[in-house]
Image (spheres, grey):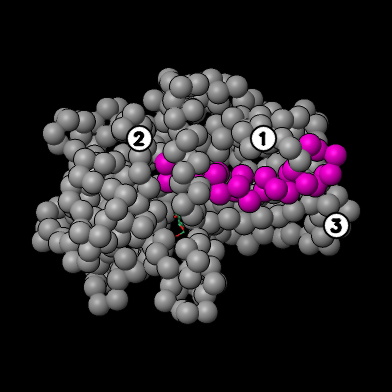
Amino acid sequence: MKAVAVFPGSREIKVIEQEDPRISQPDEVMLQTLDVGICGTDKEICTFEYGTPPPGDDYLVIGHESLAEVVAAGSAVERLQPGDLVVPSVRRPCFHSGCLACRSGHQDYCYTGDFRERGIKEAHGYLAEYVVDNERHMNLVPPDLREIAVLTEPLTIAEKALGQISWMMRHRPPWLDPQTPGEDRGRGLSALVLGVGPVGLLGAMAMVSAGFSTYVYSREVPPNPRIDLVAAIGATYVSTQAATFADLAERAGNIDLVYEAVGHSHFALEALRVLGTNGIFVLTGVPGLQAFIEADPARLMRDMVLKNQVLLGTVNAGPDDFASALRNLDLFRRRWPEAVQTLIAGRYPPERATELILGRPAGIKTVIAFDFRSGQQEAVT
Ligand code: BGC
């Protein structure tokens, strides 16, 4: 079977031929890959800044944003059967008996750092025609979401963030109604999303759906389909070319939530300065090597303490976040059918993966498709 792999030693990325994997444990399923989204992490892996092959291998099969179809199931598999669609989670637990996070199925909070991540760290990924995995790490996808479920994994980032902050939003400040239902937890509050990549745009959809009055701030200027998408979902786009952070703060009023999805340290620090009183700042971007910047930690500390602010970093996601991402995707597609369609730039065959990962993105989310039966691998540009 075909797979796309990076070889850090020889600094190569190529389509390789591999033996088809086999089910070797009763609780495993065999998956046929349908769609794999590519993202900034794949680019970092393909420029050899990030990513580690499994021990003993000189290559890593990449791809972690996957949608697949179950084609065979081991004898102990209970929840899944052939024909089911699944989105696998990315992270696998470490083996330390004392890691309470991994031992309780919350490897996205792993204490030791010895977790593995499929397609990223010490475990092969999903850019392969077939994959074998444990049933436990599969998230069942309703058939109606076939066309867009590849967006589930990037949406889990926002779901995990919202999941973590929702209790803080409901219980502090105390005058907010603690009974506010989950889907309305942003009512009366304003959110600022930084960046218009897939994580930012999906995050903006999640914020609007949660009832936040949502602003999206990025460097793009109109005309731009990403800006159109922001407008289509009822958020307000502001370009860095047209307004400073101070202008933005004046316009938005108290900024209750900042959702950072850029991974740029200077931009994030600037944004931290406009975080409102009792505000929560969520960092999701992982900066690569960047120029050293001067900061004023005393001023930051002062602001954070005197304004009851929270700074939260968040990575990866757990089963509840996958479940709420799937629920939200269904909601998004009903509410904004065209906007959701435009998120997926096109589907391309695996042979084009390298060029697409390393080149300029053709659209918002680029997808590699293995599903030759439906003919969807034809590029749409
Ligand atoms: C993935 C996460 C992963 C993180 C760090 C992101 O691109 O979506 O699942 O935990 O990279 O490796």
Question: Would you call the spot at circle 3 few (<14 residues within 10 Å), some (14-19), or many (20 or more)?
Answer: few
> Which residue does the numbered mark 3 point to in the structure image?
305
Amino acid at the residue labelled 1: Pro
Nearest to the observer: residue 180 or residue 371: 180
Left of 229 or right of it: where is 134?
left
Measured as percent of width and height from the top left, residue 196 is found at 53, 36
Question: Would you call the spot at circle 2 few (<14 residues within 10 Å), some (14-19), or many (20 or more)?
Answer: some
Circle 1 sits in a helix, a strand or a loop, which is it? loop
Measured as percent of width and height from the top left, residue 87 is found at 35, 46
> Which residue does the numbered mark 1 point to in the structure image?
181
Question: Would you call the spot at circle 1 few (<14 residues within 10 Å), some (14-19), or many (20 or more)?
Answer: few
Residue at (69% x, 28% y) in the render: 213
Q: Nearer the viewer, mark 3 or mark 2?
A: 2
Nearest to N terminus: mark 1 or mark 2: 2
Mark 1 vs mark 2, CA separation in Å:
24 Å
Nearest to the observer: residue 103 or residue 381: 103
